Image (spheres, grey):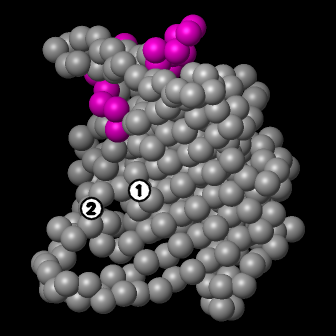
Amino acid sequence: GAWLPTIDLLKDQLNLVAICNTGAPRGEEQANKYGVKWYKNVEEMLDKEKIDFVAVIINPSQNHIVSKAVLERGISVITETPLAITVEDCDMLINLAKEKNAYIEVAENLYRMPSERIKRELILNGIFGKIWRGHNNSLTHDYHAVSLVRSYIGFDVPIKRVIGIETSFPVAKHEYRGAMVENEYTCHDVYFFENGALGFSHFTNLTWGSPLRGISSTEFYGEKGMAVGDKIFVLLDEKTKKQININRLTCNVDGMDVLDKFVADTDPEIIWDNPFKNYKISDGLITIASELASIMKSIREGVEPEYGAYNGRVDRQIDLAVSESNKKGNIPIDIS
C-alpha cells in the first residue's frame, strides 16, 4: 500500500510505533520491514503502546468499529473512507471524539490531488465567480464523487436534495478484466445545492480496464469561466475568452523530479505550492502526506482537521440518499 511508504517518507515528523494486522502474513512482514512491533489485536496495541493517532486502513465496513476503539482511549484517528457505513455511526464517532478531546480526519483523496488543488485555488480566488455546475464523469463514484463535486461548488454550501439513477445497457461484446462482457452498469447522481447550484456525477463499471471506455474527466462551470479537465477558460471581455495555462514546476530531490508548484498564468499569478517538495515524493503520495499533516496539525495545535469527520459524514449521507432515491424509483430525496 501507499500509507506505510508515505509515513516512512515523513519520519522526520512521524514515529511509526506499531502495525496491527489480524493475522495475515503481510502485517508481520511490514512490521519487520519498518522495524516496529506487530500486533494481531487492536485493543492490545492501543493499551500497550503510547500512541498519538492511528491510521485505520482496513475493510471499509469495519472503519467505525476500529475508530471507536481508538477514540474511546482518547487517541485521534485518521480513517480511510467512508467514515462509517451509516450516518448514525458517523454521528457516534463525531460525538465520541468531542467527548474524548480527540480528532478525526477522513482520508478523502480526490480534492487533495495536486491537479485539483490548483483548480481549487483558482476557484477560491474568485477567478470563475460563483461555480454553478460541477461534474464528475467517471473519474470516481459514491462518496468520493460527492466530495469532488462539493469541492467545486463549495464545502460550505449544503446539498438540499438528490436524485439517483442506476441502470444498465447492452454494449459490444469485449474482454473486461479477463472476462467477456456484453453489458454496462452505470450510476448517475444529481445534487441540488442550497444556493441553486447543481452537481452531477456519472460512473460506469467499465471505467477501469475496459477498451470500450477508460476516459474520465471533471468539469465545472461558473459565472466567468469553466474547466473541463485541465482545459481552463475565463471570459476576457464581452466577446472573447482566455485560456488559463497551468505550469508544472519541479525540483530535484535525490535524483527525482518532485513537484515544486503549479503556477496559473493569471494576473497576478495564482500558485499552489507543494508543502512536501523537500521529500522524494510522487504526486500520488502527496495526497496521503496531506492527510497525515492534517491530523498532526490538529494534535499539535488543537485545531480541526482540514477535511474532518463532518465533511466525511456529509459525503456518506448524500451517498446513501442517492441510493435511496434509486431504490424508490428515482424520486427526489430531501436532505435534512
Vertical position of residue 99 compared to residue 300: above or below: below
| Residue span colored magenta | 264-285
- In the rendered structure, the answer to whether residue 63 lies left or right of residue 169 reads right
Q: Is residue 23 above or below residue 281?
A: below
Read off the residue under disc 2.
214
Q: Residue at x 18, y 76 (%)?
A: 176
Where residue 106 appears, as percent x and y from the top left, is 60, 49
91 or 18, which lies in front?
91
Residue hosting label 1: 139
Query: Which residue is drawn at the image coordinates 75% and 29% (left, top)?
Result: 303
Q: Main secondary structure of the magenta part?
A: loop
> What is the distance, in whole Å, between disc 1 and disc 2 at their CAs?
9 Å
Dot 1 or dot 2: first in sequence order is 1
- Asked whether, in this view, residue 87 is left or right of residue 123, the answer is right
Residue 293 image position (x, y, % from top left): 54, 29
Label tally: 2
| Residue at the (59%, 44%) spot, across then down | 221
Q: In this rendering, does residue 287 appear at all?
A: no
Amino acid type, residue under disc 2 in the picture: Gly
Q: Is residue 149 magenta?
A: no
**Crowd band around label 2 with a 10 angstrom C-alpha radius: few (<14), some (14–19), many (20+):** few
- Farthest residue to the top: give it: 268
Specify whether residue 148 is in view. Answer: yes
The residue type indicated by label 1 comes to Leu
Residue at 16%, 14% (x, y): give it: 255
* Residue 280 in magenta stretch: yes
Q: In the rendered image of this protein, does residue 234 appear above or below residue 155?
A: above
Quarter holding the C terminus is: bottom right
Callout 2: SS: loop
